[in-house]
Amino acid sequence: MASTAVNAKTCEISRPEASLLVFLRSELGLTGVKGGCGEGACGACTVLVDGRPVLACQMRAGEAAGHSVTTIEGLAGAEGEPLHPVQRGLIAERASQCGYCTPGIALRAAALLAECPDPSDRQIAVALNPCLCRCGCYPRIVRAVHRAAALARGEDESVAGLALARTEPSTRCSLARPERPWDMSAPGERDWFGVLGHGLVAVWPPSAAGTWPRSGGAWLHVAASGAVTAFTGRVDLGQDNQTAFRLLVAEELAVDPADVRLVQGDTDLCPYDAGTFGSRSVPDAGEALRRAAAGAREALIDLAAPRLGGPHAYLRAEQGSVACGLTGTRLPYGTLLAGTQRVEMLAGEPPLTSPSDWTTAGRPYAAPRADAVTGARRFVSDLRGPGLRHGAVLRPPAPGSVLRSVDTAPAEAMPGVTVIRDGEFIGVTAGDPGTARRAVAAIKASWDRPPPGPSDLEAYLRAHPADGEGWQRAVTSQAGDPETALAAAAIGVQATYTTAYLAHVPLETRAAVADWENERLTVWTGTNVPFAVRARLSRTFGISESAIRVIVPPVGGGFGGKHGDEAIEAARLARGAGRPVMVHWSRAEEFQQGFLRPMAVIDVRAGLDAAGSITAWDLLDINAGANGFAFPYAVPNRRLRYRPAASPHAQGPYRALAATANTFACESHIDALAYAAGVDPLRFRLRHLDDARLAAVLEAATRRFGWRPGWQPAGRPIWRDGQWVWRGAGVAVGLEKGGRVATCAEALADVAGRVRVTRIVTGYECGAVVNPDTVMSQIEGGTVMALGGALFESVTFAHGRVARPSLSGYRVPRFTDVPELDVVLLDRPDLPSAGAGETPLIAVAPAIANAIFAATGRRLRSLPLLPDERVR
Ligand code: FES
Ligand code: FES
């Protein structure tokens, strides 16, 4: 039998025809090698073969015979030895969010440095370009490679000592499953101390009517050891809300953030939570955790008071102790809590530390988490366990198709395959994912297909109004009399703006593992709405929510799209098979079975008076939503309307979905008005802005950008990089979800009409900043994601379904697409903290569109702006 050396160990290759990816992951259990596309388009499966980067999904295992294969698990030396410089550089620059792409990128970067010890930015971008990072960490990764190069040369000692630790601190809790979920049990039922040990529990808000509120809240446990474990239903899908939570808890409890452990998104252990969306993690869950921690601190001070003896007013928490400012005596929390089992149901508002007095929160903090760079981080699709089967589901050829006939015999005849039918649902389970997929493909099914969808999507959405629930409910907001003002305007400008349907494209496609045990169901899945998934499972299987536990392990990106369909499929198959089952969607399923960001059609009419002031504004959004309607300009007569439509394609939540569309239309149109009035776009905005915070952000961003007033559209060309180009600068602002953003963009157009975006500066203010490093990372990553939707991302359709359901058929930003990025972060400790996951995206597209107008004189009103890189 042929063999290969994998991470310096000889391994026999039993199935040489299998892909190297399958061999490494399924046969050797090296789950640091990731799958993302199966077609050589994402780089997640990168390994080194004889030191050269290779896409493991594109190579047969047999081809590796006689060669040396290195996976991320083998990049560093033995346990205890320093990590590879690339791994240390990635940790030091905090160059990952979800971390799913990180192993492949680390290996490719290691190969680059082996050949080119001091690469330029361009060399790094080109070398790493086969690897996608959907979280948009490209600028940090480039910085990390430079850092790694310096480390390798011995010029940077700051992270020289980071060693490989096989056992990483887990963010998952090993607590035993309670009888009933937290939100369905009464306080007296809980064994608060069984696993976490003696100590103090603080719960906020208090229980009402015997059970916990279904509206958020938090609880935490301070152990006699001094360790703090905090519980929140809000999940972390790579946006790193967990570090902000740790900082807030550490601040109020006066402990080291390293001593705070978070348990998130476990429906049995965590407080009920409606879902992680809308940039509400810090404003909602952060505030709840802050109160629980502050309440615990006050309880600890009360406990210490009789023992310290000094007046209560002189007692304060510091460095994990209660200290008396008068006598100088102190009692560590551990001493106070030894042998104690105390539960504090916080009834009122505990006193909070003002952000202007923060000493721990408000400063950059990053725990040196190595699991993403060593392959130790286990994502949903990496989970393994005894008896685990792999599932696949029969899919219709297009949404709305009706099954006419089916013959499952060919699949049933395959060894090790079980076919499961549950009403209309047909799926299979098998011992490995490849066999499961082949078995589904062997099923003979015929379908009645619905008529193909419309070809003119704009006309269809206009002609099919609908009124729905939640974000799909019609909205109108009006001030003054816009129609009369429009009729009286000296100058009127009207236009229609559109945005395309977009796909979420998380690098880890949807995955879930389901396990039934005596009518109790446990599901591990990557979702931003674990409690809603629990409710869906309950409805689907007719069992109580209290019999269902949903756990969210590390997730390879979500962006608002992971809502649990795969969890239901896994649970159906697991029930039918009587064994735990994993369902892991293919990339094609991710495109075709998921839902999309809605397309938007937006009509805007506006009027100026003779002095160039905006007197009338009328915006109608069809289909996208009402987010981004917080109009920041002083216009006396204005109307903003959202009219839902019956979309012909499945659509749903997406990161900053409607705010992106509405801000694109609004800020493009404001720019058009500025040019109609003959006023510099920056001056025009500052003159009309009705929000001092936004004006401050705009001034800070344009100052950093070096805004020069008076640029004329398509003015004189300049000589740049060996050719004549037209240079344009654009600016746009946005106000959404409590954050204020201003984005400046520079675009260069050549004589052939090809346009490059060369620089983006983002100014952002979100009140009191809890962790500047996470906020900066979210701004950078969000800007990269927005760049794709602005320039080239677009889902196209054929025969009623996504036409090109693959990463080679749907372009997302890569290393070489990213312009120079710069961020100006304004801290306002006097204001409540707002989120940063969405608002930084919303002004990117209009800033670029306005820059393209300044460079070319062409006003582009449809996203994506440059599907083939040219202005037509
Ligand atoms: S390149 Fe191999 S899985 Fe994407
Ligand atoms: S960190 Fe790169 S895909 Fe998430």
Image (cartoon, grey):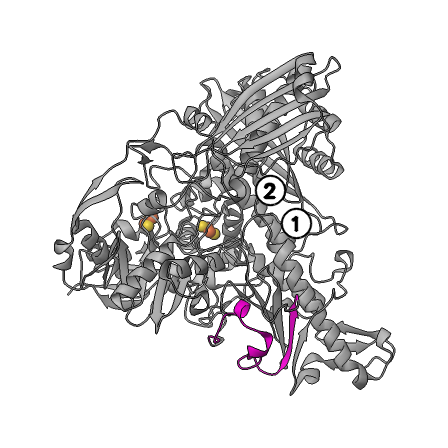
Residue 81 picture location, percent across and down = 46, 70
Residue 61 in sight: no
Is residue 620 positioned above or below 530 on the image? above
Label 1 beta carbon less than 8 Å to ligand 2: no
Residue 11 picture location, percent across and down = 24, 67
Residue at figure coordinates x 22%, y 60% from the top left: 66
CA–CA distance in space, label 1 to label 2? 10 Å
Horizontally, residue 564 falls left or right of residue 737, namely left
Residue at figure coordinates x 71%, y 83% from the top left: 336
Query: If you read the primary sequence from the N terminus, does the residue marked by circle 1 or circle 2 appear first?
Result: 1
Is residue 463 positioned above or below 580 on the image? above
Residue at figure coordinates x 76%, y 76% from the top left: 301
Is residue 629 positioned above or below 3 on the image? above
What is the span of residues highlighted in magenta in the rendered image? Answer: 177-205
Q: Pointer 2: what residue?
A: 839
**Disc 1 marks which amino acid?**
Ala
| Quadrant where the C terminus is found in the figure | top left
Pick the residue in front: 808 or 758.
Answer: 808
- As drawn, the label of residue 852 is none
